[in-house]
Image (spheres, coloured by chain):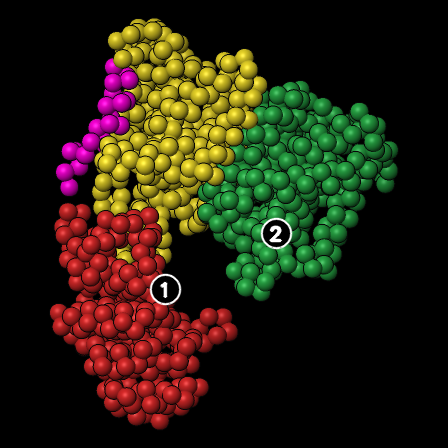
Amino acid sequence: MILQVQEVHKRFGGLQALTDVNFEIAPGEIMGLIGPNGAGKTTLFNVINGVYPPTKGQVVFREEKITGLPPYEVARRGLARAHQVVRPLNDLTVRENVMVGACFGRERLSLGKAAQKADEALAKVGLADRAGQLAGSLNVAQKKRLELARALAANPYLLLLDEVLAGLTPSEIVGMMDTLRNIRDEGFTILMIEHVMQAIMSISDRIIVLDYGQLIAAGKPGEVAANPLVIEAYLGDPDMTARLMAE
Amino acid sequence: MNAWRQPGFWVSFLLIFLAGVAVLVLRQDTLRETAFTVLMFIALASSLNILMGYTGYVNFGHIVFFGLGGYFGFYLVSEMGWPVYLAALGGGVLSAVIAYIIGCAVLRLRGAYFALATIGVNEAARAFVSNFEPFGGSTGLYVNFAAYDRYGGAAHALWFTFILLWLVTLAVVVTSYLVKRSRFGLGLSAIREDEDTAMVMGVKAPQDKTKAFLISAFFPGLIGTLYFFKNGNVEPDDAFRFQMSLEILVMVMLGGKGLLLGPIAGAFAYERLRGYLIISPMFKDLHLALSGLILLLIVLFVPGGVVGWLRERLPHYRRWLE
Amino acid sequence: MPLNRKNKLLDLAAAKRRGPETRDWQVTQILPSIIDGLLIGFVYGVAAMGLTLIWGVMRVINLGHGATMALGMFCTYFLFSDLAVNPYLGILAVVVLSLLFGFIIYGVALQRVIQAGYLSTLLATFAVNMIIIGVGTALFTTSPRNIDFSAGSITLGPVILQGTRLLAALAAVVITGALYLFLYCTRPGKAIRAVSNNRAAAELMGIPSSYVLALAFGLGTMLAAVAGGLTSTFFPFTILSGATYQLKSFVICVLGGLGNPLGALLGGLFLGGLEGVIPTFMPVSWVPVVEFVLFVLVLVVKPTGLLGAK
C-alpha cells in the first residue's frame, strides 16, 4: 500500500471536521474523493500532507508513519499536492515555480537538472511556451496547470490533486482531462478531489465519499453512484443522482 | 549553472573592486573616509538584502548585529589585544550565533509581527549594552592605542582597516550572489512568495530562513568591528541606532530589493545624496525631509527600486542588471 | 545621536520625579511612584490606542506615530505660549487639526499602497516620519521646550498627585470613552469595526472601505497627537521626543494585543505602573531592558497579547 489512512480524527475547537476516516491506496491507483461542500475533503488532504496534525489516528505513507511530520518532510518523502485555490509564487517565473517542486521534492534535484525537469513537466501540462513569464501574469486556467506541473516535477509517489478542474470553462475542462489521462497513463498514483462528477467518475479506479467528516461509501464508481447513502448526502442537489448515473 | 559567466555578477563585483583600487592608488585620506562610509553601507545593505530581498522578512534590527558584533570585536582588539582581522571575524561569528538564537524564536513570526519583534530586539540590545559594565556601560569603550601600533601607527591602521572593509564588501557581494544563484536561494524566494506553499513543496522553511538570517547577520558583525576600530571608540547610541537600520532598509528599497546590484546602487545613491544635502547651504536643515520625500516617491511610484525599474525598461540589458 | 541622549536625560528627569533611586521597599516610597506611573500610563494608553486602531483596521504599522505625537506637543505648546490658550482647551484644537492631518497623510502617502503589503506601508509611514522630523527640526530646532503650566496638586497621605497628571489621566479616560461610544454607537464607527473584522466582506456589504480607512487613520493620528499634547504638559520635549513614545506604544500594543484599543489602554497602565515600580528596586536605566525583553517575549510566546482572546 502506498498510503494508509487509519482512524483519522480531526477537531478544530468545537468543530469535528473528520471522524474515524479509514482508507488505503494501492500503487498505480487513481482514487477519487467526493462529497458535498464542507464535508472535510480539503481538511483530509491537509492532514495527509502534514499541514495539520490529526487529533487522533495515523497516516502511513509507503510503510512509514508520517503522522505529525511537517509538510516539507512529507513532500520530501514523495507526496506532492496541487491546491484547490491556486497559489503560484507570483514574482518567480513559471519555470522557477516548477523548479521549486523539482528541487525540493522527492528527488531533490540540482538547479540544472531541476530546470530540465521543469521544462518536461511544463510540456506535459501544455505551458511550455510560458516558461519565462512571471507566474503572477498567468490566467486562472494556466495557474491551475502550473499547480499541476509543480506537483508533477517533484516526481512523487503519490499526487494529491485538489479540484484541478474547478473554475475552468467546459472547453478547458476537456483539455485538462486529456492532461490528467496522460498523467494517469504514466503510472502516477493519484488521490483527487473533484466536483465535476462526470470527470471523476470516468477517470477514477475507486471512489470514496466523505460527508460531515465521515466516510459513507467506498468502491467502484458505478457502485458508489448507486449507493443510497451517497444519493442522500447529495440530496440538496436533485440533479445529482442523474449526473452520478450519467457516466 | 555556469554561475560565473553571468555579466550581472561581474558588473557588481568590478564596480566595488575598481572603486577600492582607485582609492588605494589615489591615497587621499578624505577620499578614503568617504569610500569607507559608502562601502560600509553597501555591505550592510547587501547583507540585509539576503534576508529582506531574498527571503521576504523585513528586519528593522539589522543594526543590532553591527552593534553587538562591533562591540565584541572592538573588545577583542582593544582589551584582549587580538589583531583586528581576527577580532572582526570574532565579531561576525558572535553576530551569527546571536542571530541563530534570536532567529529560532523570532522567525516563527511572520510579516509585520516579525518586523515589530526586530524593533524590540534592537532596543533591548541597546538598553542592555548601556547597562553592561564590561562594555563600558553607557559611555562605551575607547580604543587602546597600542592596538594601532601593531600596524605602524594610527594612519597605517586606518588604511589597513579600509582594505579589510573593501575585502569584506567584496565577500558580501560574492556570498549574496552565490546564495541567489543556488538551490538554497530558490527555496528562499519560494518562502518569500508564499511560505506555506513553499513548505508543501518541500522547502524546509524554518531551517532555511534561520540560515538566511545567520548569513545576513554575520557580515554586519565584521563591519561593525572595523568601523568602531577605525573610529577609535564605541558607544551604545552609535552602535544600535534605530535610524541607521531604517536607512539601510531605505537603501535596499531605493536600489531594488532582491537584486544583487540593487542594494549597491541604493547605498551609493543614498550616501552621496545625503553627503550632498548636508553640505548644501540650501538643504542642510532639510536633508532628512528631502530623503523622506524621495523615499515616499519611490515607495509610491517605483516600488521595484531604481535597478528594478531599469530592468523593466531595458529588457535587453537585464543580464547586466542582476 | 542627540535624540537618544536627550531622551535618556528626559527619562532620568522623569525617574527623579518619580522618586529617589533607592532599594528601600517601604510602601511610602513605592505607592507614590506606582500611582504616578499609572497616571502617565493613561496617556501612554491613548497614544497606543492610536497605533493599535490603525493596525487593527488597516494592517498598517504607523512609523509616523512618534512624529505625530511630537506635532501634538508643539501644537499645544504654541497655542499656550503664543496665544495663551489653556493646554487642555488647546487639546480640542489638536483634535480637529490632527484629524485633518491624518486624512491628508492617508490620501497622499497611504491610499496608493494600502493593498501593496506591509513593507510598502511601513516605508510610506516611515517616509512621512522623516519628512515631519526634517521639517520640524528646520523650523523648531532641537532645543527642548516645556509648557510652564501648573494645575496645583492634591495630597493624599504619603501621595502627592500633580494636577497636570490627574487632568491628563482624566482626559485619557474621557477620550477612551468617546472612542468606544463612537466605535459602537455610530454608523461610521460600526463601519470601522466591520472593516477591521473583515475588509473584503465589509466591502461586499457596501461599506466604502477607502473612506473607512481614511477615517481610521485620521482617528489614529488624532489619538497620537492628543497623547502628545497631554504629555507636553508634564515633560520637556523636542521634535525628536516622539521616538521614545513610539517605541513605548509598540510595547503597549503588543502587551494589550495588536488591534485591541481597550487592551492598549490597559497595556499603557501596565507599562506606566511597571515604570513606576522598577526604579524602586533596580537602577532606572534597566527599565528599557525589562520593557523590550518583555515585548519580544510576549510577541514570541503570545503574539495576540497578554489580553488577547485567541
Q: Amino acid at mark 2?
A: Tyr
Q: Residue at x 33, y 90 (%)?
A: A242
Residue B8 among magenta residues: yes
Q: Residues within 10 Å of mark 2 (few under 14, many from 20)?
A: few
Where the C terminus of chain A falls, by quadrant? bottom left
Look at chain A in the picture and name its colour: red
Image quadrant of residue C110? top right
Q: Which residue is mark 1?
A: A85
**Amino acid tagged 1:** Val
In the rendered image, the vertical position of residue B150 relative to residue C225, given as above or below: above
Chain identifier matching the yellow colour in the rendered picture: B
Residue at image position (67%, 50%) is C266
Tell me residue A174's x, y (percent). 24, 73
Main SS of the magenta part reads helix
Instruction: Give the quarter of the figure containing the N terminus of chain A.
Output: bottom left
Q: Secondary structure at mark 2?
A: helix
